Amino acid sequence: MNDQEAEATLRDLWSRRPNLTKAEWTRLYQLIHGFLQYRHWPELQSLRGTREEFIHDFFMDRVFLGGAQGGEIHHSGALVVFFRRYLISLLRAPHVRRRQDEDGGDGAEIPPSDPVDALPARGEALEKPLHVSSRDPARDLLDLVAEEVRGILTGKRQNPQENETFTALREHYGLWVPEILASARGFLTGQGLWERLRSESGWILLYLREHFCPKNGTALDALRRRHQIASHHYKALNLGITVPKGDQAALAVFRRSFRGQWLDSLGIPVDQDHRVEMALALQMLCLVALYDQAVQVPA
């Protein structure tokens, strides 16, 4: 395919993004990768990661997940502008660790001039549709359940069948804690219904234990480098800890993720009307990942 044909194909596929087939998405990815991979990007000198990883993440964040908007581009030069803005937004985002910061430099952050350009902080986009704020009455329930579940998992409390909090949770929300904890163990170790995830269990546990579940977890990029995780952004999408902005778009993507499917297996609908049930179950999943000694990271 010559340059003119490539440009024409790019324009056509880009304009039809809301309705592309899997094969067409693959072709669009190949075209975008081809247009971007050989250019010089000075912004990459200040970011941790490879050119290939940032092109992949750009495609997932700004092209694939943002594909519902459709629209047109007139030539591949627009991609250059879009990708450069994407890299600049990463440099401005306060949650992104820049190269100078880890190499002993001043690590000064570039403040975002346009909040639309800045990427959300870790978990921010997901927390909007699922979040239970500190002012919500359900927050006290989440804290109480977390304390009781943590006690069960650490051996400080016994007999979950006789726990009054768990009984009330079953009566009012239809959630039975022992059942959810058992399901969480199966999900995290790739057992039973989740046997298909057994080969994924290692990174799933790492993402939850070291990045998503702790209050001050390790940044995804640092986790990738420390454990040599391939396709780390794609994995975050699959697990449902990275989602697009916007409540409905975030819920749609999360619903298809591994954690969304786990909620569905518990009979919990992934929607705004069941945000408390979702938050309770996902909190328990995190607690099992963090405290249950029976859940081991596969070799």
Image: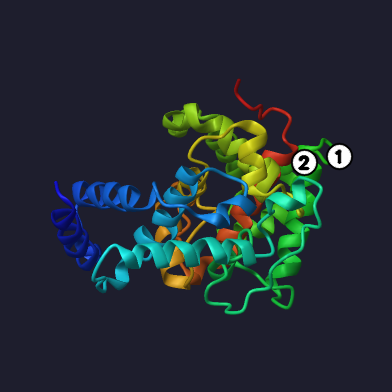
Report crowding for label 1: few under 14, some 14 to 19, many 20 or more residues within 10 A (C-alpha): few
Relative placement, left or right, of 112 versus 102 is left
Type of the residue with mark 2: Ile
Counting from the top left corner in percent of width and height, residue 46 is at 64, 53
Q: Tell me if residue 177 can be seen.
A: no
Give SS at disc 1: loop
User: Label 2: which residue?
Assistant: 152
Instruction: Establish if 257 lies above or below 72.
Output: above
Residue 299 visible in the current orientation: yes
Residue that appears at 63% across and 74% down: 112
Front position in the image: 207 or 109 = 109
Q: Which of 12 and 191 is in front in this view?
A: 12
Residues packed near mark 2 inside 10 Å, few (<14), some (14 to 19) or many (20 plus): some
Q: Which of 117 and 211 is in front in this view?
A: 117
In the rendered image, which quarter is residue 124 located in? bottom right
Residue 113, x across and y down, in percent: 61, 79
Task: Say whether residue 87 is left or right of residue 98.
Answer: left
Q: Looking at numbered disc 1 in the image, what kind of residue is underneath it? A: Lys
Q: Is residue 126 placed above or below 166 in the rendered structure?
A: below
Residue at 72% across, 35% down:
292
Q: Do the residues labelled 1 and 2 touch (CB within 8 Å)?
A: yes
Mark 1 → mark 2, Cα distance in angstroms: 6 Å
Q: Which numbered tag is attached to residue 295? A: none
Q: Name the residue under label 1.
A: 156
